[in-house]
Amino acid sequence: MITKKIFSLLFDFFVFSLGLMSLLAPFILPQARSLNQQTATFPIMISLILGLCLLIMIFEAQYSLLDSKMIAFLAVLIAINAGLRFLENAIPGPGGFSPIFILIILTGYFFGSRIGFLMGTMTLLVSGLITGGIGPWLPGQMITAGWVGQSAALLTVFVTKLGWKGKPIEVGLLAAFGALWGLLYGVIMNLWFWPFLGAGVGQTFTQTVSATENLQRYAAYYLATSLVWDISRSIGNVLIITIMAKPILKIFQRFKLRFSFENQGVTAL
Amino acid sequence: MINSSIWILWTVAVMVITLSIRNPFYLILVIVGLFYLGHRLARQKNISAWVLSNSRFILTMILLSTLINGLFAHVGSSVLFTLPKGWPLIGGNITTESLVYGAINGLMIGALYLLFNIINLALNIKQITRLIPRAFQPIAMVVTIALTFFPSIQQRTQEIKEAQMIRGNQMKKVADWLPILIPLLVSSLENAILLAESMTARGFHKQANLKAPLALVSLILAAFAVFSGWILQVYRYPRPIYITLFLLGSGLTVLTLFTIGKRSKITRYHQESWRLLDLLMGFLITFFLVSFAYLALTDRLLSLNFSPYPRLTLPRIQTLGIIFSLITLLPSIISNHD
């Protein structure tokens, strides 16, 4: 059991670092910024590698979890979340605010990292399908949303260890987590798009320029283009989580009991 | 209507060609071709002003990219004007070359954006869902159910919202959405239980045994091969090395998914048919792609590369390059006969 856990942790770490390394490539690979490199292929290659990471993660998650109960449960939650994405403009909130994160975070928090990951990735996939938003940006969005749900499971460890379950601080922690991801989501999505626009910037980078200077440039780009949106997304997350987290967790609690029907004598096909 | 696999093949071909081009003339040709195709598709689907809204987006993209590169990159010999050196990051020479370089980037982003916009137009949701590999059958199931439930959930949201408004809910604050979200969640999850029970009753409890640690290992190896191939490419290792790694990675992925997919015994309804024209098109696109790869790798299509630095010159143009840029028009030939 313990070796299995260690294996699964190692596995998560490997896939996570592969994804992160591809996203951070413009910083850690000085050669990538050299003169004749076709920097515009960069985001596409990153998407490809993120896509492969997604394949692995989803493949692993689906066979360890999904039976008819979980399939139906997840599918309906995803449909609700995709519907919420359409309400983005209807729900009064600051600009750049998106209501999809609350369900992803709470699902990851309540049902564990794998389900949280699937919830995040599939929400983005399904709403992409509905809105006609299939494209090279999708793997990046999917994996980031997946990470949101996956990392929410870390909170469970904290909360149970410290005995905060059911206390107001539980919601506070979740809200802080939502605020953090509101910002991080923007930072990561920008990382993907940055080499596109920053491609020509590579011209000014000699290979002696350090990663920190590059980081500075990224920070300037980020401040100029997206910080305001991301902050308002953060605030939106905090608002919606403080108001809605508790009732939703209660519903999850109730349905977890109801979804736990067992059937005997069933063998895999 | 072209078979969806052919559309995917065409997308890959256009993407490969677009990404290998740095010549603005060819890029413009690609974009014009995509606009023509998109216009036809949008007209078939009665979408108005497709060209207008997309050209607005693309022009913004080009402008933005030109500005950003012009402001941040201070290389090039034709100096337009100079910003004070003291300004952080943007201080320095603003050159024609860096503006042109930015515009080329913008063209490339625009072409890719259009390409995927067209794919979303050309394929319907059912066709895209069907493209999910058989090895991911549970996931395909989740996606299908979610898509099926989506309209009814929207309708239910509307009903609950109306009921709440009748009761005097003003819908002004975030908190006002709580009495909508909670009933929505409860009633939809009730539906999910019914669905799960009926699935179980129909013998659908556990999916075909997909447990395959070996498959997982080979997928990880494949991802690692592609990743390291990419790193080696960035560091300009000899071409055969990284191309072998790319081929190895993609081959391993396809093979693994194929063998796992064979294990899940599922029935597929409404299979897409293959017509002679589809096969012909597939052959033609493959031929284009292979010959393009051959010519580009043997350095016979030098006019694809163009760099405005250090001094702006007119890009070279080859007939072959023009022919390859027109690959975007291939699907519109076939629909002429529909």
Image: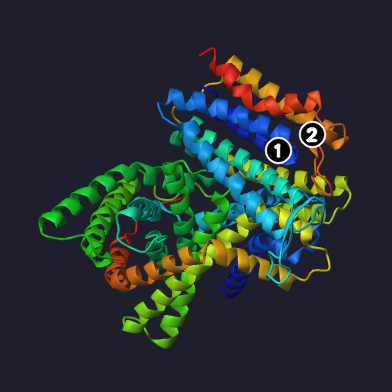
Q: Quadrant of residue A209?
A: bottom right
Q: Amino acid at mark 2?
A: Ala
Residue B60: percent from the left, percent from the top?
55, 45
- Tell me what residue is drawn at x 37 percent, y 62 percent: A103
Do callouts 1 and 2 mark residues in contact (Cβ within 8 Å)?
yes
Closest to the observer, A198 or B286: A198
Is B274 placed above or below B264 here?
Answer: above
Closest to the observer, A237 or B309: B309
Q: Residue A52: give its label.
A: none
Closest to the observer, A112 or A26: A26
Q: Quadrant of residue B89?
A: bottom right
- Tell me what residue is drawn at x 21 percent, y 60 percent: B171
Residue B84: percent from the left, percent from the top?
71, 67
Tell whether A132 sits left or right of A55. left
Q: CA distance from mark 1 to mark 2?
A: 9 Å
Q: Quadrant of residue A191?
A: bottom right
Question: Of all residues shown, which one is farthest toward the top?
Answer: B337
Secondary element under disc 1, as helix, strand or loop, is: helix
Is residue A34 at least partly visible in the picture?
Answer: yes
Q: Residue B16: give its label.
A: 1
- Tell me what residue is drawn at x 37 percent, y 60 percent: A99
Is residue B271 at least partly visible in the picture?
Answer: no
Q: Amino acid at mark 1?
A: Val
Tag 2 or tag 1, which sits nearer the N-term?
1
Residue B316: percent from the left, percent from the top?
82, 32
Is B3 placed above or below B68 here?
Answer: above
Pointer 2: residues within 10 angstroms few (<14), some, or many (20+)? some
Q: Disc 2 marks which residue?
A: B293
Secondary element under disc 2, as helix, strand or loop, is: helix
Residue A104: percent from the left, percent from the top?
42, 62
